[in-house]
Amino acid sequence: MAAFHQWAAGPVPIRSATVRGHPMSVRTVCLGWHWQPYRYSRHAGDVNGARVLPLPEWLIELGRRALASVGWPDAAAYRPDTALINFYDAGAKMGLHQDKDEVSPDPVVSLSVGEACVFRFGNTENRNRPHTDVELRSGDLFVFGGPARLAYHGVTTIIPGTAPDDCGLTDGRINITLRATGLRD
Ligand SMILES: O=C(O)CCC(=O)C(=O)O
Ligand SMILES: [Fe+2]
């Protein structure tokens, strides 16, 4: 949580990205590469032009451990170069989308802290049903890998009052996704 507060403070402060003219209800701060719809850059051109903080080695290592824990082959070779850290308050959601601004086919590793949410998972072709709704709770890990890498997904609801006492967050939800952009400077 201390790390989250530090990242959120800047040099690029946490903000709601603007998608097609509308601010997202989720607020996001990035490490390594700055994400704005629908591209990555080293500097936050849509915020204050500052360069984002580097992705710390401990998060990269966490990503490798996460992949190893689900039996991903070659987890030790995983080289994420960006993290998107999302903060959801009580009313925040994220519409169905694909994570497809990365060039690399490597998995996206998602970690959740705080209140639980209803996470909606669809298919790789379109936003149509059937959807699978799963509750992602504090401490849960979700991996978008292989055939699921480009599956549509989103967050429909934050479930109030579900944060464990010891997670460091009483209200809201933090989600961290580790990604390999496949981009070079
Ligand atoms: O909050 C989540 O669980 C998903 C976040 C997400 O899909 C994203 O940041 O692209
Ligand atoms: Fe996503």
Image: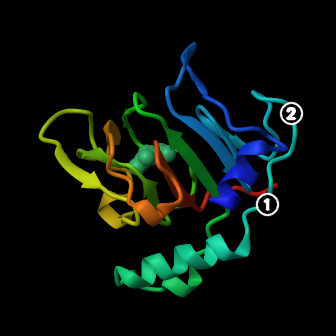
Report how many numbered discs are placed on residues in the image. Answer: 2
Give above or below for 36 relative to 139: above
Neighbour tally class for label 2: few under 14, some 14-19, many 20 plus, Cα within 10 Å: few
Q: CA distance from mark 1 to mark 2?
A: 15 Å
**SS at circle 2:** loop
Residue at label 2? 49
Q: Tell me the SS state at disc 1.
A: loop
Residue pictured at 45% horizontal, 76% vertical: 66
Residue 59 in sight from this viewpoint:
yes
Residue 50 image-quadrant placement = top right
Q: Name the image quarter holding residue 73.
A: bottom left
User: In the image, is residue 116 above or below residue 75?
Assistant: above
Beta carbon of the mark 2 residue lies under 8 A of ligand 1: no
Q: Which mark is residue 36?
A: none
Name the residue type under label 1.
Pro
Relative to 184, is 132 on the left or the right? left
First in sequence, mark 1 or 2: give its number: 2
Toward the top, the furthest residue is 21
**Residue at x 32% of width, y 50% of height:** 162
Instruction: Identify the residue position indicated by label 1 in the image.
Output: 54
* Residue type at numbered disc 2: Gly
Where does the image place residue 46, in percent across and percent down from the top left? 75, 27
Q: In the rendering, at what x and y percent does residue 3 appear?
A: 69, 60
Q: Nearer the viewer, residue 78 or 141?
A: 141
Answer with left or right where residue 59 lies relative to residue 115. right
Q: Residues within 10 Å of mark 1 (few under 14, many from 20)?
A: some
Residue extending furthest left?
Answer: 130
